Image (cartoon, coloured by chain):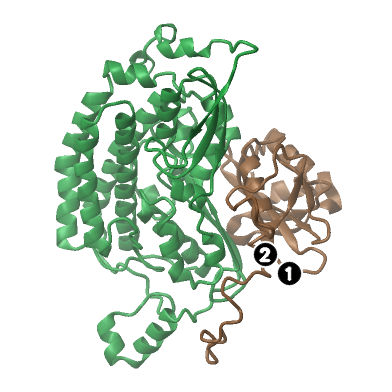
Amino acid sequence: MTNQQIAEDLVTKYGENVHSFEEPWGLLTLTTNRQNIISLLEYLKKHETFRFNFLTDLTGIHLPENTGSEFGVIYHLHSLENNVRIRIKVFLSQDDLHIPTATTLWPTANWMERETYDFFGILFDGHPKLIRILNIEEMDYFPMRKEYPLEDATREDKIDALFGR
Amino acid sequence: MEDLLIPKNTSDALALNRPIVEDTEFTTLNLGPTHPATHGIFQNILKMDGEKIVSGEQTIGYIHRAFEKIAERRPFYQITTLTDRMNYCSSPINNMGWHMTVEKLLGVTVPKRAQYIRVIMMELARIADHIICNSILGVDTGAYSGFLYVFQEREKIYEIYEEMCGARLTTNMGRIGGMERDLSPTAIAKIKDLVYNSLPKVLAEFEKLFNRNRIFVDRIVNVGPITGERALEYGFTGPNLRAAGVDYDVRVMEPYSSYEDFEFDIPVGHNGDTYDRFMVRNQEMWESMKIIRQALENLPEGPYYANENHYYLPPKHDVYKNMEALIYHFKIVMGEIDAPAGEVYHAVEGGNGELGFYLVSDGGRAPYRLHFRRPSFIYYQAYPEMCKGVSISDAIVIMSSLNVIAGELDA
């Protein structure tokens, strides 16, 4: 089972809904949309030969310069039987951060999605309990977004003309 | 394994699964945030029917330190100190995992000797991690002496850390491109003494105290069992998954740092209960010792760091005399060296399971996005399900055997 086979199979099944195939460091990476993500995850999980039965990781990313798809949700799946990993990305517009939950497929997605919501504000529709997990409940912003710089921007003692900080 | 277990129908633990009667009055119990039996700062709100747990809910995040956010401003070499503070029982594994992630991004090949030294340090860390988990499990069930025996060995491992990097708990060990220093003769002597003399004896004694101890076995057999399928659905990795009968180990599946050179077995349980988790961890310590012995015997000669001037600090005496070394030293320390753009996922077998680093670099001096896949955070979700219907004392034992580390949980 090679990345090529998986990619071809997915293109046959999903057509234009899967695109941007890449292979950084041998890890098959592809992008899909939120209408197809759950069906795609389920297909990969229950596929007879691929059997991507393990959700390794689920996280988010903020790309403010990508107009129209500022937020990304990244799934890492692992087929333990074939020892192959796959990375699936879904990009969302900052005006509409809804994506269906993966908790229906893996209970482990529960906290991963809560963490992603907590830090990026991505709303997982159908999640059993989408509340903050690591930050305090009263927090009214999503700290991992790029508009929140780590250091106080008004400080002048840290500006370094030589190194552009 | 089967013959070692007490037959299921004679175990006291089975009686705990009695049906919960309707119209009973429930009490709410707060276990934590600071409770001596939880070994960390996290809270469990338990709904109790008498002494039995009906349902539970965890509250975590009490020591959340925003590592992922901090990492977005730090040069790559400064992130090692953040990884130290995740699973602080086995910091070298976290450190090496991070270095290997960056090396993967940079395309640096580390010399064999450095890889072997890394393997030695990572396996020592694994032993230290498992020593803590198993001996504290003993303490939680009322057996204090085993803890005292093995903690002397942990102290010896910490002395080796001191010899290798000067620190004990938050080690910050190794560098991008290799090790910070070579194994000194003292370190080699200490490791040899540990894996050939003292630890095997003490571990055998520890196992003699616990493995067939009637009181201990009664407390942990059939307590908090989880099936392999359920464990996979919950994202279990590491000893907890292997205790449930799934032989997934990153060291074997995706060998890193020359793990493919060593002969070792992966112990696997089959009930996924506390006893299996205890036994798997014990056995893993023996396997780790086997790996360390092989690594010491076959330790290759050669440099202990890669010839990568851009990322590996030059020797200090060169910095004073050599112009180029001074420039590199300055640029590295100031964090002015850009990494190539790319997207890397690298996983290592941490003390608790698959410790993953998802690194997105935009070609700058610091990661654009860094996400830690922290095994404790992921499998701790299963805790309420595992302690449904058991008594408080069993719930403590289950938590102890899962080895939930607060630092790793909260990042």
N-term-proximal mark, 1 vs 2: 1
In this rendered view, identify the residue nearer to me: B107 or B25.
Answer: B25
In this rendered view, identify the residue nearer to me: B178 or A132.
Answer: A132
Left/right placement of residue A126 relative to residue B58 reads: right
Could you classify mark 2 by the number of other residues whose Cα lies within 10 Å: few (under 14), some (14-19), or many (20 or more)? some
Q: Secondary structure at mark 2?
A: loop
Q: Position of residue A18 (x, y in %)?
A: 79, 52
Quadrant where the N terminus of chain B sits is top left
From this view, report whether residue A17 is shown above or below residue A141.
above
> Which chain is displayed in brown in the rendered image?
A
Amino acid carrying mark 1 in the image:
Pro
Q: Which residue is mark 2?
A: A145
Amino acid carrying mark 2 in the image:
Arg
Q: Chain of mark 2?
A: A
Q: Position of residue A158 (x, y in %)?
A: 52, 84
In this rendered view, identify the residue nearer to me: B371 or B18.
Answer: B18
**Point 22% across, 25% down: residue:** B209
**Point 75% across, 72% down: residue:** A65
Q: Which residue is mark 1?
A: A64
Left/right placement of residue B281 relative to residue B162 reads: right
Q: Position of residue A135 (x, y in %)?
A: 59, 53
